[in-house]
Image (tube, rainbow, N blue to C red):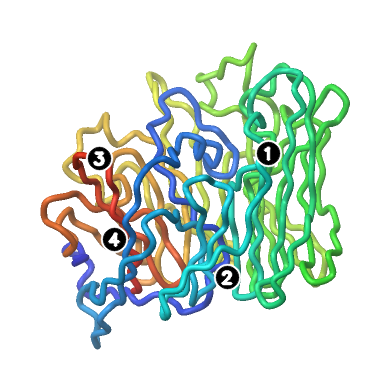
Amino acid sequence: MIKKTACTRACDSRFGAKAPQKALRVVLVSFLALALLPASSCAQLESFISLDWLYELFFIERKVEEPPKEIEFSKAVELPADMLVRSSTGSELLGIRQDAQTLCLYNIQTKELEEIYESSSDFFIKTIVSNARWVVWVEMDAEIDNAGTLARKWQIVALDLAERTNSVIDEGEFSGDYEGYGFFPLAPVSLSISDKNTFVYCKNFANGERIGSQLVYCELKSGIKRVLQESADIREDYLSDCTIYNDTVVWSRFYQTNLDDMRIWTDFRMTTHKYSDVFVYDCISEKVEQLTRDDFFFAPEIYGNYLVMVYVPLTKPGQVTTNTEIVFVDLKDKSRSIIVDENSECYEGLESASRGLNRYDPSINASCVFWRDPVTRGQYLYDYHSKVFIELPEEAGLNLAYSSMIAELFDEAIIVYQGNENSLGNLRQYYLAFL
């Protein structure tokens, strides 16, 4: 079972019950020693995932206690082994087959698996986001991130779950090697959907010999789109990391290159740009507010009036690896506080050299914040109401023989996986746990 650290006895770990508004991005990432890639919280690193892995997944409900003292697992239900779960509608799970071309819908209660879409042989499915009514995803060809003169294509597809109809929201194509753009993904990696059936995404587009970027807002039912922000050259001005909750859109804007002949200047920050600021857009008033200024905050994620994002301090003398912090923001009064850094309780017992590391890809729900890092490897949640850490120990109540780690945070659940060695190679058993 999940236990809490000594200071967490008063923590209520129950999560909210709203349907998820973000993609499930189960990504295993290596430590970045040279650079922090500012594109949708290292989403381009998803390319390291091998779709030949075997998956055993289990759906697990939580035993509710009053007051809750710990999180327990029960009622394990095995899910299809050949489906990689990427998102949820609340009552159903969405995932792709190992061929990365077949989109599946799994009903948790009836245990029925339905193939709802198959891409053409030229495309494979990447990022997926969903709500109770819509599923939206990115498709791209296999050569999308390779240099050369070959045409590389992508498209965004939306599927109405009620009517079972799909349509292409947007598409793009690149031809040429685009020298100097090797750090940037060509296909969209930043997508987000709201419960109001609105959708935002950041895309890069061919702009002559340059590559520009746009932040686009879309009403899924009508298909009406409007560009909220645009830049002409992503090396100098890059829009990414967009997220939407109800009528609020938040994104990152990276600007002023930090590169010299494609080598990152480490005497300022270990990033591709010198600065990154976070902006907030109100869909009702259509007003834009700049939340940070001339600093480096990125990868914002929003839930209600709360926001989490990554902060990159200036490089210190002798620093050789990226060191980042997770920042919590109350949008009502714009107050900010650091909730995870190298001095946090979850890193106690580690040597000081191990504390300077890359904390990235934060997510938030009604009670907790989750982040990734290469040292704790996803064994902690942070309860921002009680201001305490919740630890997932190795035993985790799942299988004492293998280590367990949190892979993803939903609005109402977490994904937990276990590492395992068997005769077939690496087998990772996944569990979806309601909290």
Please give the name of the residue rendered at 85% of the width and 57% of the height, measured from the top-left corner.
226
- Using residue 412 as the reference point, say whether residue 135 is left or right of it: right
Identify the residue under disc 1.
122
Q: Mark 1: which amino acid?
A: Asp
Q: Mark 4: which amino acid?
A: Phe
Q: Where 205 falls versus 18 (above or below)?
A: above
Please give the name of the residue rendered at 78% of the width and 55% of the height, measured from the top-left corner.
168
Counting residues from the start of the chain, the first of labels 4 and 3 encountered is 4
Counting residues from the start of the chain, the first of labels 4 and 1 encountered is 1
Q: Where 71 falls versus 33 (above or below)?
A: below
SS at mark 2 in the image = loop
Counting residues from the start of the chain, the first of labels 1 and 2 encountered is 1
Camera-side residue of 341 and 293: 341
Identify the residue under disc 2.
305
- Using residue 153 as the reference point, say whether residue 104 is left or right of it: left
**Disc 1 from disc 3: Cα separation:** 30 Å
Q: Mark 2: which amino acid?
A: Asn
Identify the residue under disc 3.
424
**Disc 4 from disc 1: Cα separation:** 45 Å
Q: Mark 3: which amino acid?
A: Leu
Crowd rating for badge 1 (residues with CA inside 10 Å; few <14, some 14–19, many 20+): few
Counting residues from the start of the chain, the first of labels 2 and 4 encountered is 2
SS at mark 3 in the image = loop
**Disc 2 from disc 3: Cα separation:** 46 Å
**Disc 2 from disc 4: Cα separation:** 21 Å
Marker disc for residue 57:
none
Camera-side residue of 368 and 430: 430
Please give the name of the residue rendered at 45% of the width and 44% of the height, measured from the top-left corner.
360
- Using residue 403 as the reference point, say whether residue 18 is left or right of it: right
Marker disc for residue 389:
4
Q: Are marks 1 and 3 in contact (CB under 8 Å)?
A: no
Task: Assign the N terminus to one quadrant of the image.
Answer: bottom left
